[in-house]
Structure formats: C-alpha cells, structure tokens
Image (cartoon, grey):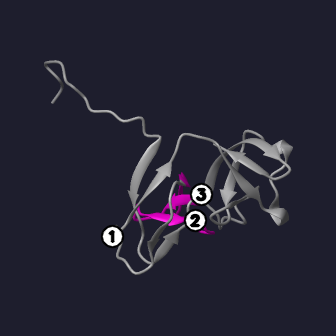
Amino acid sequence: MALSADRNTPMQDGELVNVPVATSVTIHAGALVALNASGFATPGAVATTLTYLGRAEERVDNSGGANGAQTVNVRRKKAFKWKNHGADAVVQADLGKNCYIVDDETVAKTSGTSTRSVAGKVIGIEADGVWVE
C-alpha cells in the first residue's frame, strides 16, 4: 500500500556492512570478500556463483561454524587495490571494463573461460596492483 502520510524511513550509508560468514571458511583482514550463492560471505575464489562485496575489515574464523555463526565487517563503496594476475593480467586497455575474481587478493582480465565471477570495474592500473570499484 502506498504512503498516505510522511514516513521516517531508516537509512545507513552502506559503506560498512556486517555480513554472516559461510560455513567452514576463514576470512582474513584485508581480503577480497564475495557472497556465495546462498548469500554468505566467503573469501574470493575461482567460481561462477560469487558476488563481489568488498574488503574485509577484520579477520573472522568460521572454520568450525555453521553458515552465519560468525559475521564479518566488509567495507563497500570504495575502490580497492588488488593484485594483478600475472598470467591473465589486467592492462591499461581494460580501464573501465570488468575484471574477475581469482582469489581473496587477486583479480584477472578475463573470466577464465567462464570460470570466474566479476569483481568490478577497473579504475586504475599500477605496477603493484589493479584498482577495482
């Protein structure tokens, strides 16, 4: 039903989110964090079912826990510098294009023949890494 009066709508900036962690994983502080197909935080890895989320702000060990037994703070809405995959490196011509998750600290130019999930848009390339938004 549509509003018929003013509403005090709650808000948050969405930059730092607390996300339930997947079962049997450890997420290290500073790691690339993705959501698995069930919506739980997991370290970046080669998989087609991941959704890029951002950077872990803390280390969380859920190696012995069920889905959601632990949570992790993840910073979003920023650009982060990830390592560039040497064998499938992101180059200047890839500026503005998508790059792909290789692991919890590395991105690549391609989907690896449809085996990798999208990390985000490349906004800069430096000798020591790729800036991903």
Label 2, on which residue?
48
Q: Residue at x 48, y 74 (%)?
A: 25
Residue assigned mark 3: 30
The earlier-in-sequence mark between 2 and 3 is: 3
Give the amino acid type for the residue marked by disc 1 in the picture. Ala
Q: Nearer the viewer, mark 2 or mark 3?
A: 3
Residue at horizontal 50 percent and vertical 72 percent from the top:
26
In the image, farthest residue toward the bottom: 64
On the question of residue 36 being in view, the answer is: no
Q: Earlier in the sequence, mark 1 or mark 2?
A: 2
- Circle 1 residue: 69
Left or right of 121: which side holds 68?
left
Residue 43: x and y in percent read 55, 66
Disc count in the image? 3
Q: CA distance from mark 1 to mark 3?
A: 21 Å
Q: Badge 3 local density, few (<14 within 10 Å), some, or many (20+)? A: some
**75 or 1, nearer to the observer:** 75
Find numbered disc 2 in the image and state the secondary structure of the residue it sits on.
loop
Q: Secondary structure at mark 1?
A: loop
| Screen quadrant of the C terminus | top right
Instruction: Please provide the residue range marked out in magenta.
Output: 31-55
Q: Quadrant of the N terminus?
A: top left
Q: Residues within 10 Å of mark 2 (few under 14, many from 20)?
A: some
